[in-house]
Amino acid sequence: MELTYTELDDRVNHLARELIARGVGPESNVAVFMSRSVDMLIAVYAVLAAGGAYVPLDPEHPVDRTEYVLQAAAPVLVLTTVGERSTVSDSIPTVLVDDIDLSTHAGTAITDATAYHRCVRRTPPT
Protein backbone atom coordinates (compact mmCIF):
# COMPACT_ATOMS: atom_id res chain seq x y z
CA MET A 1 0.00 0.00 0.00
CA GLU A 2 1.26 3.46 -0.84
CA LEU A 3 0.14 6.68 0.79
CA THR A 4 1.13 10.26 0.27
CA TYR A 5 2.15 12.19 3.36
CA THR A 6 -1.17 14.04 3.17
CA GLU A 7 -3.14 10.78 3.09
CA LEU A 8 -1.08 9.39 5.98
CA ASP A 9 -1.65 12.54 8.04
CA ASP A 10 -5.39 12.45 7.30
CA ARG A 11 -5.74 8.81 8.39
CA VAL A 12 -3.67 9.41 11.53
CA ASN A 13 -5.80 12.41 12.53
CA HIS A 14 -9.09 10.58 11.94
CA LEU A 15 -7.99 7.68 14.14
CA ALA A 16 -6.49 10.01 16.77
CA ARG A 17 -9.83 11.81 17.12
CA GLU A 18 -11.55 8.44 17.59
CA LEU A 19 -9.03 7.55 20.28
CA ILE A 20 -9.60 10.88 22.04
CA ALA A 21 -13.35 10.23 21.93
CA ARG A 22 -12.68 6.87 23.62
CA GLY A 23 -10.69 8.49 26.43
CA VAL A 24 -7.10 8.28 25.21
CA GLY A 25 -4.91 11.14 26.33
CA PRO A 26 -1.95 11.92 28.57
CA GLU A 27 -1.02 9.02 30.84
CA SER A 28 -3.09 6.59 28.75
CA ASN A 29 -1.50 3.41 27.46
CA VAL A 30 -2.82 1.96 24.22
CA ALA A 31 -1.75 -1.50 23.08
CA VAL A 32 -0.97 -1.84 19.38
CA PHE A 33 -1.40 -5.53 18.58
CA MET A 34 -0.55 -5.62 14.90
CA SER A 35 1.96 -7.02 12.46
CA ARG A 36 4.21 -4.51 10.76
CA SER A 37 2.14 -2.69 8.16
CA VAL A 38 0.91 0.72 7.11
CA ASP A 39 -2.07 0.27 9.47
CA MET A 40 0.35 -0.33 12.36
CA LEU A 41 2.26 2.84 11.53
CA ILE A 42 -1.00 4.81 11.39
CA ALA A 43 -2.07 3.32 14.74
CA VAL A 44 1.20 4.25 16.47
CA TYR A 45 1.14 7.83 15.15
CA ALA A 46 -2.55 8.18 16.08
CA VAL A 47 -1.88 7.13 19.68
CA LEU A 48 0.92 9.68 19.93
CA ALA A 49 -1.21 12.40 18.31
CA ALA A 50 -3.96 11.71 20.85
CA GLY A 51 -1.44 12.23 23.63
CA GLY A 52 -1.16 8.61 24.72
CA ALA A 53 1.67 6.12 24.89
CA TYR A 54 1.66 3.03 22.73
CA VAL A 55 2.51 -0.45 23.95
CA PRO A 56 3.78 -2.53 21.04
CA LEU A 57 2.59 -6.13 20.97
CA ASP A 58 3.71 -8.63 18.34
CA PRO A 59 1.04 -11.11 17.23
CA GLU A 60 3.82 -13.63 16.67
CA HIS A 61 4.70 -13.72 20.39
CA PRO A 62 3.23 -16.40 22.67
CA VAL A 63 -0.20 -15.67 24.11
CA ASP A 64 1.14 -15.88 27.68
CA ARG A 65 3.65 -13.11 26.95
CA THR A 66 0.97 -10.92 25.37
CA GLU A 67 -1.34 -11.41 28.35
CA TYR A 68 1.49 -10.55 30.76
CA VAL A 69 2.29 -7.31 28.91
CA LEU A 70 -1.40 -6.37 28.77
CA GLN A 71 -1.77 -6.97 32.50
CA ALA A 72 1.37 -4.99 33.34
CA ALA A 73 0.69 -2.06 31.01
CA ALA A 74 -3.05 -1.83 31.74
CA PRO A 75 -3.93 -0.19 28.40
CA VAL A 76 -7.24 1.66 28.07
CA LEU A 77 -7.78 -0.14 24.76
CA VAL A 78 -6.15 -2.33 22.14
CA LEU A 79 -5.71 -1.37 18.50
CA THR A 80 -5.66 -4.39 16.19
CA THR A 81 -7.00 -5.67 12.87
CA VAL A 82 -9.84 -8.02 12.00
CA GLY A 83 -7.35 -10.77 11.13
CA GLU A 84 -5.42 -10.48 14.40
CA ARG A 85 -8.40 -9.89 16.71
CA SER A 86 -8.94 -13.52 17.63
CA THR A 87 -5.81 -13.68 19.80
CA VAL A 88 -6.56 -10.55 21.87
CA SER A 89 -8.18 -10.77 25.29
CA ASP A 90 -11.84 -9.75 25.46
CA SER A 91 -11.25 -8.06 28.81
CA ILE A 92 -9.90 -4.86 27.22
CA PRO A 93 -11.88 -2.69 24.76
CA THR A 94 -10.64 -3.26 21.22
CA VAL A 95 -10.65 -1.05 18.13
CA LEU A 96 -10.32 -2.78 14.78
CA VAL A 97 -8.43 -0.19 12.77
CA ASP A 98 -9.23 -1.79 9.43
CA ASP A 99 -12.96 -2.07 10.15
CA ILE A 100 -13.93 1.17 11.91
CA ASP A 101 -15.84 4.01 10.28
CA LEU A 102 -13.81 7.15 10.93
CA SER A 103 -15.77 9.39 8.58
CA THR A 104 -17.48 11.14 11.50
CA HIS A 105 -14.14 12.57 12.64
CA ALA A 106 -12.24 15.44 11.06
CA GLY A 107 -8.95 14.73 9.35
CA THR A 108 -7.47 18.02 10.45
CA ALA A 109 -4.43 18.13 12.70
CA ILE A 110 -4.85 17.38 16.39
CA THR A 111 -4.02 20.55 18.26
CA ASP A 112 -6.51 20.34 21.09
CA ALA A 113 -5.82 16.91 22.65
CA THR A 114 -3.91 18.22 25.64
CA ALA A 115 -6.38 21.03 26.34
CA TYR A 116 -9.30 18.61 25.97
CA HIS A 117 -7.92 16.14 28.49
CA ARG A 118 -6.88 18.84 30.92
CA CYS A 119 -10.43 20.12 30.90
CA VAL A 120 -11.98 16.66 31.31
CA ARG A 121 -9.54 15.48 33.98
CA ARG A 122 -9.35 18.88 35.68
CA THR A 123 -5.58 18.78 35.65
CA PRO A 124 -4.03 22.20 36.23
CA PRO A 125 -1.99 23.58 33.33
CA THR A 126 1.78 23.28 33.58
Image (tube, grey):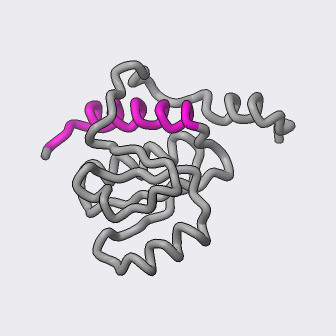
122 vs 112, left or right, is right
Image: 108 above or below 114: above
User: Which residue lies at the image location 21% right of the left edge and 36% below the top edge?
Assistant: 4
Q: In the rendered image, which quarter contains the C terminus?
A: top right
Membership of 4 in magenta stretch: yes
Q: Nearer the viewer, residue 6 or 48?
A: 48
User: Which residue lies at the image location 35% right of the left edge and 70% below the top edge?
Assistant: 58
Which image quarter: residue 35? bottom left
115 vs 126, left or right, is left
Q: Which residues are magenta?
A: 2-22
User: Which residue lies at the image location 76% right of the left edge and 28% below the top edge?
Assistant: 119
Which residue of the protein is positioned furthest toward the right in this rendering?
A: 124
Membership of 35 in magenta stretch: no
**How many marks can you see?**
0
Image: 94 above or below 9: below
Q: Position of residue 112 (x, y in %)?
A: 61, 28
Q: Position of residue 74 (x, y in %)?
A: 61, 62
80 vs 31, left or right, is left
19 vs 43, left or right, is right
Q: Nearer the viewer, residue 88 or 102?
A: 88
Q: Position of residue 30 (x, y in %)?
A: 52, 54
Main SS, magenta residues: helix
Q: Position of residue 85 (x, y in %)?
A: 32, 56
User: Which residue lies at the image location 39% right of the left edge and 61% below the top edge?
Assistant: 88
Which residue of the protein is positioned furthest toward the left in this rendering?
A: 1
